[in-house]
Amino acid sequence: MRFHRSTKLLVEPSTVTTGDIAFNLIVFFLVCASVQPDSGRKQSVPRSEQQEKEKAKVEHVEVRLTRTTAAINGDVVRARDFVPRLRALLAGKTRPEDKVVVVRSDQETPYSHWIAVTAMIEEAGGIITILREEEREVQLPR
Amino acid sequence: MKIRRKTMRAEVPSTAMGDIAFNLLIFFVILARAQDDSFLKWQPAHARNLEQAGPSKVSVLIDAESKLYLNGRQVGAAQLAKQIGELLGEAPPGQRTVLLKVHRDAQAMRFEPVIEAISEAGGDLVHILEKEKE
């Protein structure tokens, strides 16, 4: 009996570079995954010089913020009533300078609360202006 | 009788050239991110109706420890307006975007002067926030 020896060799793709390819892919996806959040909200805050000039002419709506509350012209307003209330106050005003809403925050007001309230002011059609209480150093007599 | 020495051709293996080039490319791309502040710890506040911030040359960040950073470098609040102004230069309106990343629990005494400084420098302020889950 005769056996025929097959001369066909098994050809396999080279696997030497597989490690390199895997490493490159890992690096590539790591770089892609480390993307920071890039969505947000535009906000135009008028320059302080302009607002000082306008302050004397018009009586603006004032929103006062504490750690958890928001008050319109001194009255604490619940979140769901905030937009309708402010919209009503701004209703008759047509000029942009009349729609300025002065935001005054307590020093410990958290950013998340500030953002939520300023979003509602913009929703009501107001233009945000920040009023900050200046820190002054007072020297006590010895 | 002289025996001739056989000359062998020695070649540098070029199989890994592509991989090396690719790695170098990634390396330089990472380095080129001048305003990289991805190493800083902060958590964005939540909000609805967000839009893409778009490209920006200036990024201001207040981290979880209330430290202030301009393009990844720690700065003082007093010089912020001037430094932002220098970075923005004579850029026309629409290309003066300043990204503001504030940790959600940062207090008004810390972030309000920053907002004021951006406004003073003539920057177009964009708050970087996370979309609120419905």
Image: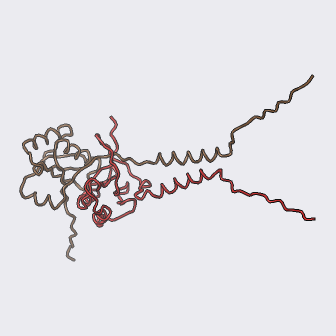
Chain colours: A brown, B red
Q: Residue A41 in the image: state x and y as whole percent.
A: 28, 46
Residue A116, picture quadrant: top left
Q: Is residue A21 above or below residue B116?
A: above
Instruction: Choose between B31 and B93: the one closer to the eye.
Output: B93
Residue found at the far top of this picture: A1
* Residue shown at 16% from the left, 43% from the top: A125
Q: Residue furthest bottom?
A: A142
Residue for point 55% across, 46% down: A26
Instruction: Please name whichever residue, A8 or A95, is drawn nearer the observer in this view of the structure.
Output: A8
| Residue at position x 57%, y 54% in the image | B21
Q: On the image, which quarter does residue A137 sit in?
A: bottom left
Residue B33 lies, in percent from the top left, at 43, 56
Closest to the observer, A6 or A96: A6
Number of numbered labels in the structure image: 0
| Residue B82 locus on image (x, y percent) | 28, 66
Query: In this rendering, would A44 be left or right of B39?
Result: left
Position of the N terminus of chain A by quadrant: top right
Q: Residue A96 location, x and y as percent? A: 12, 49
Name the residue nearer the viewer: A35 or A16: A16
Residue reaching furthest to the front = B1
Question: What is the quadrant of residue A48 in the picture?
Answer: bottom left
Quadrant occupied by the C terminus of chain A: bottom left
Q: Is residue A61 left or right of residue B30?
A: left
* Residue at image location 74% in from the left, 58% down from the top: B10
